[in-house]
Amino acid sequence: MVVCKKCVSRLSRYRKVLLRFKDLGFVKVFSDTVGDATGVSSAQVRKDFSLFGIAGNKRGGYNIDTLLDKMQIILGKDQVHGVIVIGVGNIGRALIQYKGFEKEGIAIVAGFDINPAKINPKAQVPVFSIKNMKAFIKNKQIEIAILSVPERAAQEICHKLVDAGIVGILNFAPIRLQAPEHVEINTVNLQVELENLIYFTKIMKKK
Amino acid sequence: MVVCKKCVSRLSRYRKVLLRFKDLGFVKVFSDTVGDATGVSSAQVRKDFSLFGIAGNKRGGYNIDTLLDKMQIILGKDQVHGVIVIGVGNIGRALIQYKGFEKEGIAIVAGFDINPAKINPKAQVPVFSIKNMKAFIKNKQIEIAILSVPERAAQEICHKLVDAGIVGILNFAPIRLQAPEHVEINTVNLQVELENLIYFTKIMKKK
DNA sequence: TAGATTGTTAATCGATTAACAATC
DNA sequence: TAGATTGTTAATCGATTAACAATC
């Protein structure tokens, strides 16, 4: 088995519950404990750990601090990752104002918008004109961008981002972005999520 | 094969591109066309269609209007679904203000918050106290809720929602919610998405 | 008719789980 | 030591793709 998106997402979630366990004063955990807390089978937990080169002690489980140290490195938590937000509309503004990522090594460092009324270089998280985007990305060596522009603008801006050096995009526009192989794109499509819920709740009622 | 989340999500996406094709004046499509536009294999498209009981014409492809009519029904677009937002913080407010779902039969009809400062029953999308949540849900027969409260409050409110009759939850809190079998939960975890991008972009650089 | 596309079956692929030897 | 848990291999499960008969 090779490292896939799902594996990394599970790793994120393992880390989350391990931090909580540590907070509660625990020192070690078993694959079973972590599995229960994350809704994953214990076999899956062990397999994931071994996939990422994380070892435990037979009979002794896993030491939480050791796990967290390893995960820290794997998930790049040993450095702060600057992230920019393109499109300061409803969603974009929400993400810029959200403070929850800071302590997790993810810093939203700037927003960009085409609308002059949105621009505010003096704000805590400054918002600049899209014209300045490329220079900013190159200058600060930003690698990851959150794309929250209207659908019609998304593909063009995606090209510009890639051109400027962005290699990871969290896309909120409801389209499949075209980008080179080396660019990683995760799309969050809220309408699809809601339609999914509507479908399954409708089905449920029929039963 | 049975209908799974992925299948329904693909159906949503097929519908999206079909609307665009129709807009462009097309009358019929082939599994290949739809596949190309959505990044899915043509075999998958045909399989999905047949799974949802949608038939085409051998040699003649699929009629777009027929497809859209069928999908309309399957995805519950023949009625408006009222959705409420619990927690009017950054994300919650963004969703309440977002107007994009309206024409898709998804209406955000109210917000709820525990903070009196957030309450505003006169707004276009009114925001009420959480105390009124249960009565509202029962009264308006709301089935779907978007949960955008802080992590620590999420599980308790989830229980309350289910108790009031909610059967579908779009969860933005970074935890695995516990709920009865019949309740459908989709979780959007932005931190996990970003950590995912960080991991894969880091890997890419090593190569 | 000839050619192209659907609809479905069988083959493949990948991910998850079961099982158990290794071992602390 | 005896018992419990890891780490890994084999088995299973489910989803995707290939292939092709049916047919418009």
Image (cartoon, coloured by chain):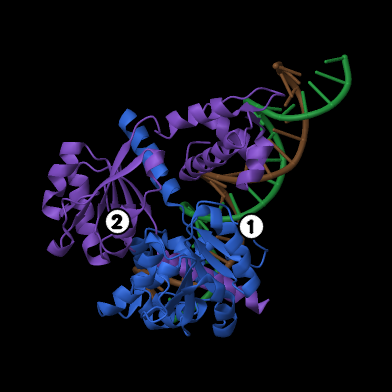
Chain colours: A blue, B purple, C green, D brown
Query: Are discs 2 and 1 both within one chain?
Result: no
Q: Residues within 10 Å of mark 2 (few under 14, many from 20)?
A: some
Q: In x, y percent, where is residue A155?
A: 59, 58
Considering depth in this image, is B161 or B182 the residue closer to the camera? B161
**Circle nearer the viewer, 2 or 1:** 1
Relative height, residue B48 to residue A49 (above, below): above
Q: In x, y percent, where is residue B106?
A: 35, 41
Q: Work out which quarter of the rendered image holds the N terminus of chain A and state it.
A: bottom right
- Residue matched to label 2: B177
Residue appearing at x 41%, y 42% in the figure: A195
Q: Residue furthest front?
A: A116
Residue appearing at x 54%, y 66% in the figure: A169
Residue appearing at x 62%, y 37% in the figure: B24
Compared across the picture, whether B162 is left or right of A165 comes to left
- Residue matched to label 1: A178
Considering depth in this image, is C13 or A113 the residue closer to the camera? A113
Q: Work out which quarter of the rendered image holds the C terminus of chain A and state it.
A: top left
Q: Amino acid at mark 1?
A: Gln
| Residue A158, numbered label | none
Considering depth in this image, is B200 or B90 the residue closer to the camera? B90
- Chain that bears disc 2: B
Q: In x, y percent, where is residue A119?
A: 43, 72
Q: Residues within 10 Å of mark 1 (few under 14, many from 20)?
A: few
Q: In x, y percent, where is residue B102?
A: 37, 42
Q: Amino acid at mark 2?
A: Leu
Q: CA distance from mark 2 to mark 1?
A: 34 Å
Instruction: Tell me, yes or no, if residue A46 can be seen here.
Output: no
Residue appearing at x 40%, y 40% in the figure: B103
Relative height, residue C21 to residue B4 (above, below): below
What is the secondary structure assignment of the residue under circle 2? loop
